Amino acid sequence: MLAFNFFGATEGGLFDINATLPLMAIQVVALTYILNSLFFKPVGNVVEKREKFVSNNIIEAKNKLSEVKKLEADLLTQLQSARTEAQRIVSEAENESDKLYKEALELANNEANASKEKARLEIESQTLAARDQLSKQADDLSELIVNRLILEK
Amino acid sequence: MFFNSLLTNFAALEVGQHLYWQIGNIRLHGQVFLTSWILLGALLVFISLGTKKMENDPKGLQNLLEFLWDYIRDLARTQIGEKVYRDWMPFIGTLFLFVFVSNWGGALIPWRLIKLPSGELGAPTADINTTIALALLVSLSYFYAGLSNKGWRYFEYYVHPTPIMLPFKILEDFTKPLSLSFRLFGNILADELVVGVLVFLVPLILPIPVMFLGLFTSAIQALIFATLAAYYIGEAVEEHH
């Protein structure tokens, strides 16, 4: 009885293939179309829209980040150049003041030398004049002495 | 004596008996359609509820459906490839959902409580007609996929590494639907029979682990069926260089 039910039975059996097969196939194909319009398309639209949104946001954020990094690097170079510029200005000013100091020193030295020279010359000429006068007075005095001696005789 | 009583027990399970519907000249297995309509109806209600109010921030059912969608997409994409998986995703997804819902519906719902004049309700995939229908659809699909994507160059696949492969590749076209249909049919029927026999012999507790095992097998079978279908389609559309 069991064997009869199991295999090759004319009526019933496990391997009883009949019109159920094509109808089930049609049913599955119909189900494919129904599920496509009810499930796969709408859910796919929502999911893919969200995935697009997320990936767009990520790209945007990456762009912004790179922009920020660029600006940061820009700022850093600007800072660097400003620093070197300041250093240059400071050293320039130092040189300038150094030069000015040297110039002033030289000028003062020259002036002092010149006045020293002038004074020396003056002293010399006055010495000469005084010596002249002295020798003249000596002459006068000797003459006077001579005259007096002559007169007394 | 014992063997004899076991046989009658088997007979009490009503293996291979059907509820026949006669429409004109054709005869149908009514119980298969009844259960499939109930299960597919439940599936469609579930999906319509989940997709009724779709939002950008998914909530509740929409979350589950999106997870399912993502799972099916990954399955189709890994097997079929980036280029054409979109065309076949609904078909692969339908196969997966149909087999999964049928298997689990057959295992989880106590159909036996509903008495039919002949045969009994159960998983639609435990009927050979259903599984052969699914397997033949897969065969048609991969032929169609190959021919529509590559034209007559599809047949290069038959002689691909060497022409020696030709008879084996032709044989494969027959073994693919055969193995697909019989694997699913055998697994689900065997599960139903094991649970049925155990319930009949020891109606308490003992059948529960077997039922869980059955649920596991059912899910795995759905995954295997969908994955293999996708793999066959992927194989047909793959470009050989």
Image (cartoon, coloured by chain):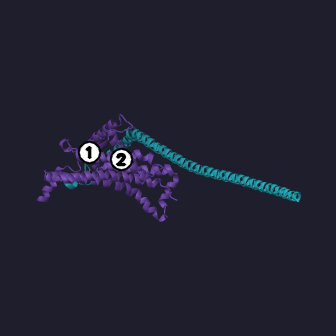
The percent coordinates of residue A32 (x first, y second) are: 38, 42
The percent coordinates of residue B224 (x first, y second) are: 34, 53
Determine the secondary structure under disc 1: helix
- Is residue A66 shown left or right of residue A9? right
- Can see residue A141? yes
Front-lying residue, B131 or A96? A96
Give the colour in which the image draws chain B.
purple
The amino acid marked with disc number 2 is Leu
For this orientation, the residue located farthest to the left is B1
- Is residue B97 shown left or right of residue A130? left
- Relative to A100, say whether A42 is above or below: above
Front-lying residue, B197 or B213? B213
| Chain coloured cyan | A
Q: Which residue is mark 2?
A: B95
Q: Which residue is mark 1?
A: B105
Q: Residue at x 13, y 53 (%)?
A: B202
